Image: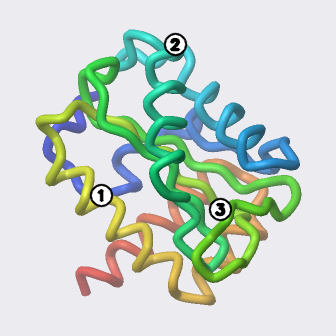
Amino acid sequence: MTTTQTTEINQLLRPEQVRIGLPGQTKTEVIEAIVQVLDDHESISSLEAIRSAIFEREQMMSTGVGKGLGLPHAKTSAATETVAAFATTAEPVDFGAIDNEPVRLLLLLVGPEEHKSQHVKILGRISRLVSRDDLRKRLIQVNEPGTIIEILREGEAELRG
């Protein structure tokens, strides 16, 4: 599946890239766990390089963007395409978010440097989606990866609407 041009989050995700109740009690633990979701992804050449790039980016500034959303992301040559993983956390996690609200939703996004504009659009899109209380609550309550993708698809259709 080629995702080079899409800015639709739901098109970047497959059920195997979605986790419900991601384990971890710290920001480091949940980031490690969501990076692991991309193990064996065909567009990732080195999970270790992805992990390193994500934590390097996180050191610059927390990717806890508020409203319970964490957006660990990085641009790296270890990704040949833009790749995403999505998770709900088992427990609220302190992410050092700008609003001090613990994180319950995570979108991991990695891609090559040349996909920078796509990367920015996707990060903005997920932030807009999760700022909607009803959608955020639905995502946290779901227990099926396919349903998460469907909720995101519906939300994105409404954004375009």
In this view, 48 is above or below 159: above
Q: Quadrant of residue 44?
A: top left
Quick check: 50 left or right of 43? right
Query: For numbered disc 3, what is the local secondary structure?
Result: strand
Quick check: 43 left or right of 50? left
In the image, 141 versus 55, the foreground residue is 55
Q: Which residue is mark 1?
A: 8
Q: Quadrant of residue 92?
A: bottom right
Q: Residue furthest front?
A: 60
Q: CA distance from mark 3 to mark 2?
A: 23 Å
Q: Earlier in the sequence, mark 1 or mark 3?
A: 1
The amino acid on which the numbered mark 3 sits, given as a three-letter code, is Leu
The answer to the question of whether label 1 and label 3 lie on touching residues, with beta carbons closer than 8 A, is no
- Residue at the spot 58% in from the left edge and 80% down from the top edge: 135
> For the residue carrying disc 2, how many other residues have a C-alpha within 10 Å: few (<14), some (14-19), or many (20+)?
few
- The spot of residue 107 in percent (x, y) is 52, 53
- Residue at the spot 58% in from the left edge and 76% down from the top edge: 98
Count of numbered tags: 3
Q: Which residue is mark 3?
A: 105
In this view, 148 is above or below 2: below
Q: CA distance from mark 1 to mark 3?
A: 17 Å
The amino acid on which the numbered mark 2 sits, given as a three-letter code, is Asp
- The spot of residue 120 in percent (x, y) is 25, 58
- The spot of residue 28 in percent (x, y) is 72, 40
Q: Which mark is residue 40?
A: 2
> For the residue carrying disc 1, how many other residues have a C-alpha within 10 Å: few (<14), some (14-19), or many (20+)?
some
Query: For numbered disc 1, what is the local secondary structure?
Result: loop
- Residue at the spot 23% in from the left edge and 31% down from the top edge: 112
Q: Nearer the viewer, mark 1 or mark 3?
A: 3
In this view, 98 is above or below 35: below
The amino acid on which the numbered mark 1 sits, given as a three-letter code, is Glu
